[in-house]
Image (spheres, rainbow, N blue to C red):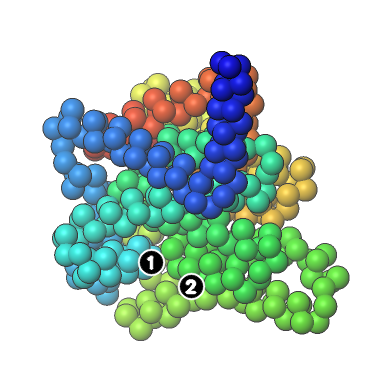
Amino acid sequence: MIAKNWAKFSNRYAEFYHWLSTTNLGIFFIAAFFLLFNQAVEFFILSDLGYNYQDLCWWDCLRYRSIVENGYNPILDLEPKLQNLNLVFFPVLPLLAKLFNSLINLGTTMSLILVSKIFFLLTIFTFVKFCQTYSNKISPWIASFVITFSPYQIYANTGYTEVIFLFLTCLAFIFLKQNRYIASGIAAAFLSATRPSGIFFLSSYLARFKEFLKSTTEKKIEIILGFLLVPLGLASFMFFLYLKTGDALASSHVQDLVWHRVLQHNPFQVISNGLSNYSTQSLEASLPLVYLAATSLIALIISLILLRQKRYELAFFSLSSTLFYLSFGLLSMPRFVWWQAPIVLVIAEISSHKKLQFFILPIFFLSSALVEIFWINKEAFLV
C-alpha cells in the first residue's frame, strides 16, 4: 500500500514538475517565486542596515530621476557633478517611470525602482524562455536562479536600464529564432532606445545571411524590414537630441565631458593595461582595474566559445557589444557584461552541470548580497 501510494505521489509530482517547467504559466510561477525570494533577501539587507527602498536610487538612477521630473537638460557645459546633466541617458526607462508615476503617483524615485522590479519579473520569465529557445541543457530553475541572484542583480532592483535591456534582448532573440523578423526588429528598436549597444542586434540579423539567401522573396522583404527597424530607437533619440540641443551626438559628447569616455581605445590594449596594473600600482588601486579587465576578458572568451559553437547570432551580438564598451575603457564593464543575454546563457549552461552548480550557485548568492551591500553603502568597488 505504501509503495503504491508513493508511486502515485511520485507520478503526480513528476507531472506537476513537468507542467511547471514547460508551460508559460508554470514558468511564470517559477519566476515569481525567485523574485519573491530575491525581494525577501533585499528587504532583510535594507532592514539590517537601516535603509529604505528609496536609498537604492543612487548614481545613474539620480539622472534618470531628473529626466522624469524635469526632462532632458539642453545645456552641455554644466558643472559635471550636477545631476541634471542627463543627455547621456536613453529614454525608455524614464518614459516608463513617468507613465507609471502618473498612474500610481508614488513619487519619481519609487516609480523608477518599481518599474525595474516589475521588469525584473518579466525578465526572469523571458530569460527562461530564451534559454529554452537556444539551449536544451538549462532547467527553468537554474536559469531563474542565475539571473535572479547574478552578482549584479542590484541593477534590477534600482532605477537602471539593465533589466529592461535584458528583457528586450531575450525577446528580440526569441522572435529571431522563430523567424518572426518584424517582431524581432520591433523589440530590437526598443532595445536601441534603451542603451546604445542595442544597435548591435544588427549583427545578429547579419548572422542570418545564409538564411536570407535561401528565403523566398516575401521572407527576404520581411528580414530587410526587421533589420531596418533595429536602429529606429537610436535614430529617434538622436533626432530628439538634435531638436533639443542642435547636436544629434549630444549623448556621446556629454560622456566625454563628464566621464572622459571617448570611443578611441584599442579594446585589447585596454584589457592588457588593466591586467598589468597590479605590477605598477598598489594592490588597493590595481585590484578594481584587474577585476574589470578580467571580467571583460571572460566576456570575450564566452563570445568566442559561442562563435566556435556556431551560435553566430548570439556570438556576434556579445562580441560587438563587449568590444564597443571596451573601446571607451574599463569603467562599468560588469554592467555591460552581466546583462548580456548570450553571456548569461553560457553561464547558466555551465551552472547546469551537477558537479559545478553546488559550487557556482552559492557564490552567486553570496556575491549578489555583497554587491548590494556595497551599493547601499555607496561604495563603488566592483560596481
- Where residue 314 sits: x, y (%)? 66, 52
Q: Is residue 259 above or below residue 378?
A: below
> Residue 102 vs residue 13: left or right?
left
Q: Is residue 300 above or below residue 3?
A: below
> Residue 360 vs residue 46: left or right?
right
Q: Are marks 1 and 2 in contact (CB under 8 Å)?
A: yes
Q: Residue at x 16, y 60 (%)?
A: 107
> Residue 213 vs residue 235: left or right?
right
Say which of 32 and 205 sits in front: 32
For this orientation, the residue located farthest to the front is 1
Q: Give the secondary structure at mark 1.
A: helix
For this orientation, the residue located farthest to the left is 50
Q: Residue at x 68, y 44 (%)?
A: 135
Say which of 294 and 360 sits in front: 360
Q: Residue at x 55, y 72 (%)?
A: 186
- Where residue 304 sits: x, y (%)? 70, 42
Q: In the rendered image, which quarter contains the C terminus?
A: top left
Residue 326 seen in the figure: no
Q: Give the secondary structure at mark 2.
A: helix
Q: Which mark is residue 233?
A: 2
Residue position marked by numbered label 1 in the rendering: 92
Location of residue 16 (image quadrant): top right
Q: Which mark is residue 288?
A: none
- Where residue 109 sits: x, y (%)? 20, 56
Say what amino acid the circle numbered 2 marks. Answer: Gly
Residue 294 seen in the figure: yes
